[in-house]
Image (cartoon, helix red, strand yellow):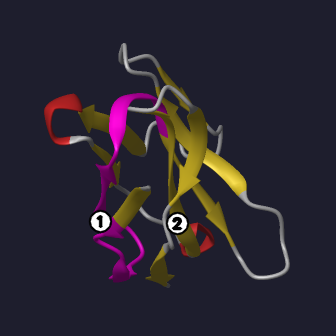
Amino acid sequence: QVQLVESGGGLVQAGGSLRLSCVVSGSIFSINTMGWYRQVPGKQRELVATITNGGSTNYADSVKGRFTISRDNAKNTVYLQMNSLKPEDTFVYYCYANVRLITGFGNNYWGKGTLVTVSS
């Protein structure tokens, strides 16, 4: 079993910053790609950023230059530093991890989400 627990969401004014964290725990052998997605109710979940275990990153065009994804492999943790936040960044943010279990099986796992609200 694998758990992903996000933290760091909240209310911030436009132009402000927040840092999201996500800790992955459980019967983990290794973690491949980790990332952040976001969603509003009734709409499709959209990519924010991903990072491979080698450190290669990928960002949605809407967040490039403002958001930075990073990870600490020793802590099984992924971060999302969000700067210059805009009201349109208001979403529930979900952590994602592609995990290989100690049993040898691999799967994708999601956190429960953390709400980010940006006021104008």
User: Which residue is at 62% across, 70% downward?
Assistant: 88
User: Which residue is at 51% across, 68% downward?
Assistant: 86
Structural crowding at the residue carrying mark 1, measured as other residues with C-alpha within 10 Å and reported as few (<14), some (14–19) or many (≥20): some
Segment colored magenta: 6-34
Q: Name the residue under label 2.
A: 93
Q: How far apart are marks 2 and 1 (CA)?
A: 12 Å
Q: In this view, does 2 lie above or below 72?
A: below
Give the residue type that dot 2 points to. Tyr
Q: Is residue 46 left or right of residue 33?
A: right
Quadrant (top left/top right/bottom left/bottom right) for the N terminus: bottom left
Q: In this view, does 9 lie to the left or right of 76?
A: right
Q: Is residue 83 magenta?
A: no
Quarter occupied by residue 17? bottom left
- Could you say where residue 63 lies in the image, as x and y percent from the top left? 55, 46
Q: In this view, does 92 lie above or below 96?
A: below
Q: Can residue 55 be seen in this view?
A: yes
Quarter occupied by residue 27? top left
Give the residue type that dot 1 points to. Leu
Q: Name the residue under label 1.
A: 18
Nearest the camera: 101 or 25? 101
